[in-house]
Image: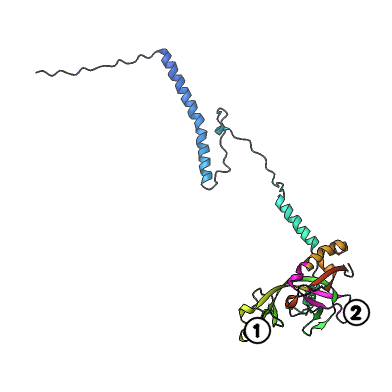
């Protein structure tokens, strides 16, 4: 049986007309123009890559092609930079400077014991400290003010000027009559006012049968002051006032009253002269007590 050869299909060559020749030539011209326009983009991309690899391309300028209408090809004109630009102060900086100036303007000079220590330091006496053991303490007991460890009576009233205040704690052996007591700046009462340990005193109380459960710690206000307007040896004497809890608010409020009554004091506490008096008895029995009463009576000399 004879094999049949597969049929071969022959595609005739296309006929190129004169019009096709003109279209091909136009397409070639368009392609060449497009290639010319894309070449600057390659330079721009290289500049961006250089900038990413160490900012080496920051000063490189992309070439300008006026024939292109895309945003990537438009190069903005350089802006002239002033070598000494104006630096504007921020609002926060202005406020900080204003606050600092205000603090300097309203700062008050050191007074009382602080001024005394600074004055001695300028004379070469450095390392001095003012504390609870530096001056005699004034306390109110049974209707009279007593001064110092000798408990010298100084009357039922006295005039003074204030220098500073801070909290102090009275540690009592028990809450009955005539307990042993000591003062401490430690809220837990473990230290004496000079910073030494009070454990020896506390151990003695325990041996006497008064354990920690019987101890009473009360917060007082310690006022560093100077006695004034006196005609005895205690005039201008620096002292410490131990104001009990029931009288602290009375003392705090007297400044508001005093500044309004004596505006020449300039709302500066050491400029006010205050008078302390024995108040009327409050309560009955063993719990009865007499509070401190305060009155603003004027301003110190020289104000």
248 sits to left or right of 8: right
Q: CA distance from mark 2 to mark 1?
A: 39 Å
Q: Nearer the viewer, residue 194 or 35?
A: 194
Locate the C terminus and report the quarter of the image it occupies. bottom right
Expressed as whole percent of the image width and height from the top left, the position of residue 192 reads: 68, 79
List the single residue furthest toward the front. Answer: 285
Expressed as whole percent of the image width and height from the top left, the position of residue 236 reads: 85, 77
The residue lying at 84 percent from left, 63 percent from top is 259
Circle 2 — which element? loop
| Vertical comparison of 111 with 32: above or below | below
Disc 2: CA contacts within 10 A as few (<14), some (14-19) or many (>=20): few
Residue 269 visible in this rendered orientation of the protein:
yes
Expressed as whole percent of the image width and height from the top left, the position of residue 130 reads: 75, 77
Res. 175 image quadrant: bottom right
Instruction: Name the residue carrying label 1.
Output: 201
Circle 1 — which element? helix
161 sits to left or right of 170: right
Q: Which sits earlier in the primary sequence, circle 2 or circle 1?
A: 1
Verify whether residue 241 appears in magenta: yes
What range of the chain is rendered magenta?
Answer: 224-249
Disc 1: CA contacts within 10 A as few (<14), some (14-19) or many (>=20): some
183 sits to left or right of 279: left
List the single residue furthest toward the left. Answer: 1
Instruction: Name the residue carrying label 2.
Output: 231
């Amino acid at each position: 049986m004879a094999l049949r050869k597969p049929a071969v299909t022959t595609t005739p060559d296309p006929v190129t007309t004169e019009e096709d020749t003109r279209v091909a030539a136009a397409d070639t011209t368009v392609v060449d123009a497009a290639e010319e326009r894309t070449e600057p983009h390659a330079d721009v991309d290289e500049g961006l890559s250089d900038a990413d690899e160490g900012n080496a391309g920051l000063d490189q300028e992309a070439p300008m092609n006026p024939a292109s209408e895309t945003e990537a090809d438009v190069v903005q004109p350089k802006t002239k930079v002033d070598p000494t630009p104006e630096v504007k102060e921020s609002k926060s900086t202005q406020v900080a400077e204003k606050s600092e100036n205000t603090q300097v303007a309203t700062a008050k000079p050191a007074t009382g014991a602080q001024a005394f220590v600074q004055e001695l330091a300028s004379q070469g006496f450095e390392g001095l400290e003012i504390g609870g053991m530096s001056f005699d303490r004034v306390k109110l007991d049974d209707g009279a003010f007593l001064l110092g460890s000798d408990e010298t009576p100084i009357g039922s009233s006295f005039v003074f000027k204030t220098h500073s205040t801070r909290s102090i704690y009275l540690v009592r052996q028990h809450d009955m009559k005539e307990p042993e007591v000591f003062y401490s700046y430690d809220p837990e009462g473990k230290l004496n006012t000079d910073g030494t340990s009070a454990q020896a005193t506390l151990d003695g109380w325990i041996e006497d049968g008064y354990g920690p459960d019987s101890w009473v710690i009360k917060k007082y206000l310690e006022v560093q002051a100077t006695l004034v307007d006196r005609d005895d040896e205690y005039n201008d004497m620096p002292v410490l006032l131990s104001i009990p809890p029931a009288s602290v608010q009375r003392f705090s409020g007297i400044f508001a009253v005093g500044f309004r009554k004596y505006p020449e004091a300039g709302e500066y506490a050491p400029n006010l002269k205050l008078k302390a008096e024995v108040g009327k008895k409050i309560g009955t029995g063993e719990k009865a007590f007499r509070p401190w009463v305060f009155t603003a009576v004027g301003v110190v000399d020289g104000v």
